[in-house]
Amino acid sequence: MKCHKVKVAGKYDHPTTCVSCHTKAHIIGTKEKFPRYLFASGVELCWGCHDKTKFSKKVGHPPVAKGECLSCHDVHTSDTKALLLAPMPDECFMCHANSNFTRKSKHPPAAEGKCMGCHDAHSSEVKKLLLAEMPKECFLCHNKEKYISETKKKHHSPVATGLCLNCHEPHSSDAQKLLLKPTPDVCYMCHDGSDFKNKFNHSPVASGMCMSCHEPHQGDVRKLLLAKSPELCFICHDKRGFERKNPHPPVSAGMCTVCHEPHASKDVALLYYPTTDGCLMCHPKIGKAPHAAGGFSQVGHPLKDRKDPKSRYGELSCTSCHDPHSSDYINLFRFKAKTAFELCPSCHAYKKTKK
């Protein structure tokens, strides 16, 4: 150290002595074979002590593959562990753009500068220098049972195939949960968005709240629903309107989607077809003969194309007289009546004839 300025002043020092890397050629007067009187050139010198196999796996970090150890490490001393040139993650940001890691929603390891929680610094058998193949990489921290448990019947296809990054950013995102895009746009990357947009849209769909009805990873119900129908629907819809004395059979069977589209429809109330047309699919005789309430004529009571003074949708339909879900009266009558004739005054004013 009589000639060389003392550089061993950092918090962490290279553990070997000078002569572990440098020869005594300058002392004994022989010609140097490698610059700085090193025993070997570049990375070959490092491998004199460090196990080469740890740096020579299938996927190499570019500086390692090029033998540029000093791109990341100081050779003699440093204030950072592993003789890094800068603390983590600043060390990585010397090459990697930090804008990809500092967006609104951050993966905790990225936010805490723990890059090595997911990546090997030198080489790996897995792409992106990951510590393990996907999804095992994620399960190093995340509980596997919450995402792909053998006890669950249904799994979202990307989860089942280990494609976590089909939906999530690994480092940071402007969307919550590290999603590639906000919902529902992230869902529309695979699911056809046109199926979810129409004249009438289910409120959760219109507001992009897919997770109001669906599990994103796994579940016990088809379509990854949070619950079976009708319990799922009753999370939002008042159960009392569906459990009166006389229920519509599809309602009592919990078959809401026999009549309703769950996402979007061109028809009111998310029906598959215009109200009366939908009813006639199960009740075809109503359209072929005068309805019970139409005994006053041979054509029956009109079921469409007429104004309904009591309907918020404005047009007469089966639901002008019948509740489509349940009723306290016979025949699912919407108004208090024991017979079809008694139902008429609900809309029609009439005077009793004098005897």
Image (cartoon, helix red, strand yellow):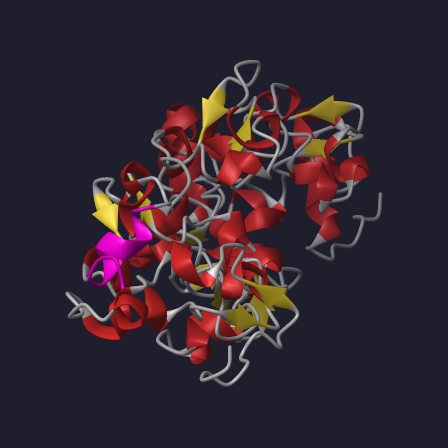
Closer to the camera in the image, 107 or 85: 85
Location of residue 228 with respect to 75 vertically, above or below? above
Q: Position of residue 28 (x, y in %)?
A: 27, 66
Q: Quadrant of residue 160?
A: top left
Q: Main secondary structure of the magenta part?
A: loop
103 falls in the magenta region: no
Please count the marks in the image: 0
Q: Position of residue 108 (x, y in %)?
A: 62, 58
Mark yes or no: residue 347 visible. yes
Is 47 colored magenta in this rendering? Answer: yes
Which picture quadrant has residue 249?
Answer: top right
Q: Residue at x 30, y 58 (%)?
A: 194
Q: Residue at x 75, y 32 (%)?
A: 327
Residue placed furthest toward the top: 151
Residue nearest the observer in this picture, 9 or 201: 9
Q: Position of residue 312 (x, y in %)?
A: 62, 64
Kindly identify the residue that appears in the image at 39 percent across and 24 percent down.
285
Magenta-highlighted residues: 38-48
- Is residue 196 at least partly visible in the picture? no
In this rendering, the answer to whether 301 lies above or below 67 is above
Q: Nearer the viewer, residue 128 or 313?
A: 128
Left or right, 176 with reference to 272: right
The quadrant the C terminus occupies is top right
Q: Residue at x 46, y 32 (%)?
A: 223
